[in-house]
Image: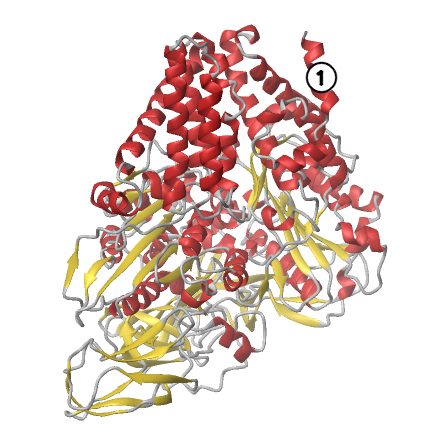
Amino acid sequence: MKEYQTITEISGPLVFVETDEPVGYDDIVEIELSDGETRRGQVLESASDYVAIQVFEGTEGIDRDASVRFLGETMKMPVTEDLLGRVMDGTGQPIDGGPEIVPDERRDIVGEAINPFSREYPEEFIQTGVSAIDGMNTLVRGQKLPIFSASGLPHNDLALQIARQATVPEEEEEGDDDEGSEFAVIFGAMGITAEEANEFMDDFERTGALERSVVFMNLADDPAVERTITPRLALTTAEYLAFEKDYHVLVILTDMTNYCEALREIGAAREEVPGRRGYPGYMYTDLAQLYERAGRIEGREGSVTQLPILTMPGDDDTHPIPDLTGYITEGQIYIDRDLNSQGIQPPINVLPSLSRLMDDGIGEGLTRADHADVKDQIFAAYAEGEDLRDLVNIVGREALSELDNKYLDFADRFEEEFVDQGTDTARSIDETLELGWDLLSMLPKDALNRIDEDLIEEHYREDETAETVEAEA
Amino acid sequence: MSQATDTDVREDGIIESVSGPVVTARDLDARMNDVVYVGSEGLMGEVIEIEGNITTIQVYEETSGVSPGEPVEGTGSPLSVDLGPGMLDAIYDGVQRPLDVLEEKMGSAFLDRGVDAPGIDLEKTWEFTPEVDEGDEVEAGDIVGTVPETPSIDHKVMVPPDSEGGEVVAIESGNFNVEETVVELDNGEEIQMHQEWPVRQQRPTVEKETPTEPLISGQRVLDGLFPIAKGGTAAIPGPFGSGKTVTQHQLAKWADADIVVYVGCGERGNEMTEVIEDFPELEDPTTGNALMDRTCLIANTSNMPVAARESCVYTGITIAEYFRDMGYDVALMADSTSRWAEAMREISSRLEEMPGEEGYPAYLSARLSEFYERAGYFENINGTEGSVSVIGAVSPPGGDFSEPVTQNTLRIVKTFWALDADLAERRHFPSINWNESYSLYRDQLDPWFEDNVRADWPETRQWAIDTLDEEAELQEIVQLVGKDALPEDQQLTLEIARYLREAWLQQNAFHDVDTFCEPEKTYRIMDAAKTYNDAAFEALDAGVPVEEITDIDAAPRLNRIGVQEDYNEYIDDLEDDIESQLRELY
């Protein structure tokens, strides 16, 4: 291992070093400062006579006398089942004072793409206990479903609620099967505040979830560049647990916006040609390399399900970060500011939310035969009600027909009863769907054109309409 | 690391620098677009720039750990695909490496590096039946024999387009692998079932003709309002979640093409898996065989190397052209061309080229036109006629259609299916906006619909368009004053238009029956709405209040036609009921 003291330029998070031997692209570098402190970095560009290095812990205090060592390998994550229950910093060093980690294996953190031919299509329903998700935008094992939120909204509460409540119904029925796979949560925090971090850690400890979790913490005051490796460490650990140790892993990544900011910072320091809003042109590829690490593999028990959280700058979902994310992930859950101010918990706006893998994960044998139809009808009726709200502001309720008034009531009750459930209530899918029928029965039968006639006969509450009609009369 | 580093890479040049997928090499003697093998692992790449002694290469695989000083080997030939029997029912990555073979060779579910595999199985034998005799003269492109490739498709073995042709002196019949000679010509040329063709070069044809036949998609809104021709081009732009991929999948499943080439360019891995799992189980509506028997899949998911994403659309269209040369109608779906354009942008920015609009390279428009122009209805050089229809999904950032990829695409394609986030939000699927979309093929395809479906197809369709247009105008007023403030005839039009939207334009891709709708059924649903319209206006003229007209219980049954298998009988009854119930009102 050769040591160089030939730093030529230090700029932002980058260090340029003259070399006389070839250095591998992406290789890991150690930089020793004159006071003995060691920083780590990664080769971003390798030419025959110089390399560009991105320093994870920041370049503060580095001078041209610092010595640079190339380790001759790419960044690796030591993985073992013993990681469960441990808390690490953003570069994978334990910070919980626990014993040293003895790895089973050291894995490349970049990860290789799963061969699409080897994937298994995700279709196992995960019950999150949240009606707006289970009923309307169902999550399945192996899916990547981001939460689109914004500053000041309770996305963390929702993420925690899901992490706490998520079950797969078959598990409940069979009880704790020794043969079955276990559930694990991997939490990758990028640039969150110490307070938010405490909120997560307290909840993990309170509910005992920490035992089955691996936590990676890069806080807001940690170096930004470090954030680019935190999710990769988390996902490498997730893949190991899922595909070697048969765990069903739920990966929560928060906040992807901070991750993208870090990418932009590095891009700017390298004087790259910027893409939209200054983010690098390769951000789509970079994000895809994270998000696509969710999934199932044929012949393996485990699965990696991703729940990335991102805060949309200015609540704008056309901003490059949510936009590129939406194009890669299999749907999205929107947290809505208006619903939040109405006190709806969790404030999920189901209309723009979507789960692309839903259609194959629901129905007879998976959830319930009427699930798809009920979902379609609720969407249509709620959208109708939403539209009418604008109109009511202008013409008033009296000017609307009886049916239109029912749609308005439906929209209100949908938000207050179906979406609003509090952060501690877990509803089973049966409860969710029955609640859906309670609401749909406000509408006359022939307005339910998305539902199969037999299902209407089976589930429609006859008295419900009578009640509302009377009430109106 | 790689288990497949058994290949020794010849040292034709030396790596000078590495930056992501872009590698420069010194002293490499290569031509533009030649394929090269990079580094001691032999990663596949392509020459994209030559400047003095330095050659720039885009590498189709991940370059972590590759360092300057490692060797680069030139192959002396451009990026080509292997053509021959065995391409149907296959699934490839962006440079035509079969993914199932890769899985086996790598022994892992993850894609390793430095593993190469031919696009078609070189060992497998196929039953070759000659179509020419000894003594016959053959020219470039001529069909010399057939191979039953799948139950649906007979693969035609052709004289390669760059051959000189000549007299057949020997021809074999029986089982051969693709590399064995089946025909020998008098000039000593030997013809095998296997041929190669550079992907960036169009396969030759005699001439491009005006398409007159529709590519029936089984989707009412497309066939009914915005049809695409066999040999036509279409673009499907839409923000995320608006249903691009579902529409593309529906077309791949139900379009009445002989061959479907599906290019997943920067797509989600799980979506490709869905195709791989679904298609073998689905039935081709025209032949009754498995859908995979006519399908070739190219899957370069978003996390696979970016350079291979750039090349995957070319791989796809070259395969499509090869089948076209046999006289088949081929449909190519590219999902999504924006990812392809972004791959160009990414490579371009690493080359530090001067960027054009929004950072895309200045040649974006030229590349898009080149690609779409490879579609068309052609007379092939062997005298057969075949077509390549291209349907490209576009993913505009933020759903904004004014961005460069959408705009440059719209300048070339003749059919525009605009996906609409608002429709998708209210779960109106397929969420194709009928006011914004267009098809410039409508007039040239009308004669076909008149001859093959109903003579009054164009008139009935025009009625539907007018009704929907009027609805759009009336809706603006309704937004301000409410529906009840409108005159009765306009209220009725709104009601009819609603049925057109719900019963005709909406279609459930996940319903066994509704997923495919033949042109006859498309016509009948539209016509049933018109029957209601005509009878209702008669009743209105006779003084029946509009509430009573819209309240008849037969009308909502319109919305259930889509899911009826025996729709003829159902519609007959329904039309009778509508007319008699309205009759009773006056």
The residue that appears at 72% across and 24% down in the rendered structure is: A462
Instruction: List x then y, in percent, for residue B332.
Output: 34, 58
Report crowding for label 1: few under 14, some 14 to 19, many 20 or more residues within 10 A (C-alpha): some
Tell me if B103 is positioned left or right of B329 in this view.
right
Give the vertical position of B77 relative to A357 (above or below): below
Tag 1 residue: A466
Q: Foreground: A237 or B70?
A: A237
Q: Foreground: B147 or B561?
A: B561
Instruction: List x then y, in percent, for residue B199.
Output: 29, 69
- Look at the image and tell me in which quarter the N terminus of chain B lies: bottom right
| Scheme of image coloration | secondary structure
Instruction: List x then y, in percent, for residue A355.
Output: 58, 44
Q: Foreground: B289 or B579?
A: B579
Q: Amino acid at mark 1?
A: Ala
Give the vertical position of B420 relative to A273 (above or below): above
The residue that appears at 76% across and 65% down in the rendered structure is: A81
Instruction: List x then y, in percent, for residue A85.
Output: 79, 56
Tell me if B504 is positioned left or right of B144 in this view.
right
Q: Quadrant of residue A61?
A: bottom right
For the image, the number of numbered tags is 1
Tell me if B173 is positioned left or right of A160 in this view.
left
